[in-house]
Amino acid sequence: MMHELENNSYPVHREYLIQLAKKYGTPLYVYDSCKIKKQYMKMKNAFTGIENLIINYACKANTNINILKFLQNLGSGLDTVSIQEVELGLKAGFHPKRIIFTPNCVSIQEIKKAVDFGVRINLDNLSILEQFGGYYPDYAIGIRINPHIMAGGNYKISVGHIDSKFGISYYQIPHMKRILKNTGLKIEGFHMHTGSDILDIQAFLSGAKVLFKIAIDFPNLDYIDFGSGFKVPYTKNDIKTDLTSLSSSMTEEVDNFCKNYGSKITFIFEPGKFIVSESGYFLVSVNVIKHTTSTVFAGVDSGFNHFLRPMFYDAYHCIENISNPNGRFRFYTVVGYICESDTFGLNRKVKEIREGDILCIKNAGAYCFSMSSNYNSRYRPSEVMIFKGKDFIIRRRETMQDLIRNIVYIQHM
Ligand SMILES: *Cc1c(COP(=O)(O)O)cnc(C)c1O
């Protein structure tokens, strides 16, 4: 179905989502490419004060190759954390030099593969740095610095504090310099990433200051990468990272640094959630309404095998009953069909839910499909992308074949 262009975009109407649920079945992920583009442009436009600023989409948020391609066409680079993400990025058409590989606790073998692919490599521990320098003294690398900042919406996603496993501590810079001297290895960039869902822009600014302090001693760097952690709203009046005030303070810091630094340098942000979270809608069908002594449950055809964030991070995702817009509000606990507690939303005010209704879970574009599994031997959902006003299936629903593809049978059992 073609949509009218409203405010330069194709709005995702409730009726349209219902049509998609009918056409492709549930559970179903739907991504609105217009929203992805809007978010990409919003970030790009917020930082126009910084010359040579690029955006590297952090693809672990959502690695569907169509989304990677879409962002590549917009001019984005790519932030990757595994060699498989690197390969997906290359398949999507990213130039190797537009891909930064920032692994944590991976083997030197995996890093060697990244060298073979020719992508940029960003190391975060001294042991691997020393080994790497022994093998590839001429392959300039980036260094992930741990700026010792506690930031992020949840301890699991706070990755820049002093006891975090990520990054090389800035107190270890003397040791890092010794390794560089001993191996002849060159540094092309410095990087930090302190967490996800960061509200306090001070976390970005303090981190940037730490990077600048270190970088000033390294002439001819290619880039300084400020990482990500931009918070998006999960509800109507939810707070989000204030890009405008971040941009003005950040631009000032960057200007000061550039004056002292001399040579030209690229600055990078690597948002994942900010780019894709709000573009996604997760559609599920209600299988059963069940009353207990205290609660009305709405049980849906999905669970934490498909959508883990509420259970793993206590994340709040809006839930709407899109098939009963005129119903009156009632209270429900929306749960999945997994044989373990898997609550999507506790005691939520939702338009009256009937068996067979379709619920829409919002902010489903980031860390949703990409964290899905086959637990309970369920198929993972299919994915649809709305592109130029039309819907395209971008991942088929799985089948029994997918579940047993790699099984090897023991003969004569
Ligand atoms: C996960 C990750 C990001 C993206 O974080 P968001 O909160 O999704 O923006 C960026 N950089 C690195 C190194 C990451 O691991």
Image (tube, helix red, strand yellow):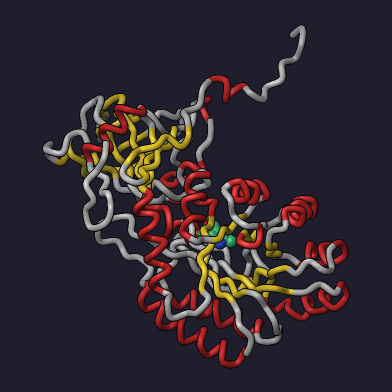
**360 sits left or right of 214 in the view:** left
The N terminus appears in which quarter of the rendering?
A: top left
**347 sits left or right of 74 in the view:** left
Residue 7 in sight: yes
Q: Is residue 20 above or below residue 271?
A: above
Q: Is residue 169 above or below residue 399?
A: below
Q: Considering depth in this image, is 267 or 155 the residue closer to the camera?
A: 267
Q: Quadrant of residue 352?
A: top left
> Could you tell me residue 59's position as x and y percent?
54, 53
Q: Is residue 406 above or below residue 307?
A: above
For the point 38% across and 31% down, the residue is: 27
Q: Considering depth in this image, is 317 or 383 the residue closer to the camera?
A: 383
Q: Quadrant of residue 329?
A: top left
Residue 297 in sight: no
**388 sits left or right of 153 in the view:** left
Q: Quadrant of residue 115?
A: bottom right
> Could you tell me residue 112's position as x and y percent?
79, 54
> Could you tell me residue 309's position as x and y percent?
44, 47
For the point 56% across and 92% down, the residue is: 259
For the point 46% across and 58% down, the residue is: 74
For the point 62% across and 59% down, the residue is: 99
Q: Is residue 51 above or below residue 384?
A: below
Q: Residue furthest bottom?
A: 260
> Could you tell me residue 386's position as x and y percent?
36, 43
The C terminus appears in which quarter of the rendering?
A: top right
Q: Considering depth in this image, is 3 or 373 the residue closer to the camera?
A: 3
Q: Considering depth in this image, is 232 or 268 the residue closer to the camera?
A: 268
